[in-house]
Amino acid sequence: MNTAAQIAYKNTLKQFCQSIIEQRIATARQAMAAAQEAANAEEKSSAGDKYETARAMGHLEKDMHAKQLAGLIKELSALNAVPTGIIYQHIQNGAYIKTSNGHFFIAAGLGKQVIENKIIYLLSPTAPLAQQLQGKTKGHRLLFNKEWLVVEEVF
């Protein structure tokens, strides 16, 4: 794969990550709106405590979704800051890594994904494996979860 193809591939991976996070953001917004609607729809009844409890639960659910949304927005912002137009010799954020045990892209923690018929692990820069890989180059060996990984390619 030439340099232009490597950069294009990393851009494809980044766009894949963005679409997943944007989808999760939309889901969190919908869940927040539904929780708010449910809290507002609770009708006052003779059982006042039940009414207040249901409204409070609705607001707690909305707050939970709001925290998830804030985390997702932060994750999307961090992903957008990941440079993919650079070919790396040393593993760092934005690097694609092929090892003896799999393919990895360090940008966002979205786990195991199938992209273009290939299993790729999308790692957060703070993930333990990403931390161990940082700074390594082609040919490095490292032990992770009782398995040896050999870095076969970095770009």
Image: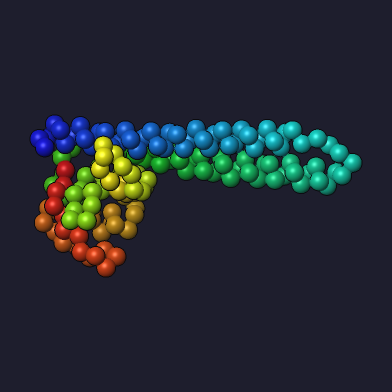
Q: Is residue 73 above or below residue 147?
A: above
Residue sitting at the far front: 117
Q: Residue at x 34, y 48 (%)?
A: 112
Which quadrant of the view contains residue 146? bottom left
Q: Is residue 110 left or right of residue 88?
A: right
Residue 96 x %, y %:
21, 44
Residue sitting at the far right: 46
Instruction: Assign the C terminus to one quadrant of the image.
Output: top left
Does the rendering let one see residue 77? no
Q: Is residue 38 left or right of residue 92?
A: right
Q: Is residue 65 left or right of residue 129?
A: right
Count of marks overlaid on the render: 0
Q: Residue at x 53, y 37 (%)?
A: 28
Residue 143 x %, y %:
22, 65
Q: Residue at x 84, y 37 (%)?
A: 44
Does the rendering let one see residue 148? yes
Residue 127 x %, y %:
34, 54
Residue 91 x %, y %:
20, 50
Q: Is residue 49 above or below residue 43?
A: below
| Residue situated in front as seen by the camera: 9 or 63 | 9
Instruction: Assign the N terminus to one quadrant of the image.
Output: top left
Q: Residue at x 59, y 36 (%)?
A: 32
